[in-house]
Image: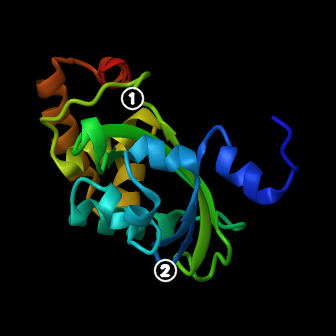
Amino acid sequence: MDLPLDYRIAFDLAPIGLAISRRRQIVDCNRQVLAMFGAQRDQLVGQSFELMYPTAAEFERTGARIAASLDAQGWYADDRVMKRLDGPNRGELFWCHVSGRALDPAEPHAAGIWAFEDLSSKRRLRVDFTGREREIAALLIEGLTSKQIGKRLAISPRTVDVYRARLMRKVGASTTPELVNKLMAG
């Protein structure tokens, strides 16, 4: 295959999902994003990222968390639960690593570029978790303490502990390290 090397081809054929955003709407995305979410280009371009989340509440909470957690250069990364839009796996929830940056850290959602990596082959999703439980599970996997999670999510550390206890019951773990191991293994 003899293709001219240009940025458009590099973007489209990148081995990881890429999307460009303005005001939390998708301006452009590559083939890997389309395949990952089971979507056609016209289903995503011009649409809100909200389509890719299990619920509108999770979309809003994630947006607030991103705005509050950008580093000085505008970088952000986390593991979160996303939703497939169409195709044979329509509606399926899956773990996804999302990283990227806001082009202007002072305006986190004005414009950005985001990378998506499907983690479903490494981490299965327990679909009986609530949105908040999935959010806390992802932060526990990152190694954050109850106090750090509480600060990130604007809830009390005690509330985090209540959610952690629920997660431990649901997966049959008796310690936090065991919980994290079970969450990572599915």
Residue at mark 1 to residue at mark 2: CA–CA distance: 28 Å
Q: Give the SS element for disc 1.
A: loop
Dot placed on the residue nearer the N-terminal end, 1 or 2: 2
Q: Quarter of the image for the N terminus: give it.
A: top right
* Percent position of residue 183, x then y: 32, 25
The residue singled out by tag 2 in the image is 23
Q: The C terminus is located in which quarter?
A: top left
Q: Name the foreground residue: 87 vs 172.
A: 87
Residue that appears at 21% across and 18% down = 173
118 or 148, which lies in front? 118
- Is residue 54 shown above or below 13? below
Residue 120's label in the rendered image is 1
**Residue 28 seen in this snapshot:** yes
Q: Amino acid at mark 2?
A: Arg
Return the x and y of residue 71 as percentages of the image width and height: 64, 63
Residue type beneath disc 1:
Ser
Image color mode: rainbow
From the viewer's perspective, is residue 131 above or below residue 49? above
Residue drawn at (32%, 65%) of the image? 50
Mark 2, other Cα within 10 Å: few <14 / some 14–19 / many ≥20: some
- Asked if residue 80 lies left or right of residue 78, the reply is left
Horizontally, residue 178 falls left or right of residue 105, namely: left
- Left or right of 103? Residue 149 is left
Q: Secondary structure at mark 2?
A: loop
Residue in front for this viewpoint, 3 or 112: 3
Residue 170: x and y in percent read: 12, 27
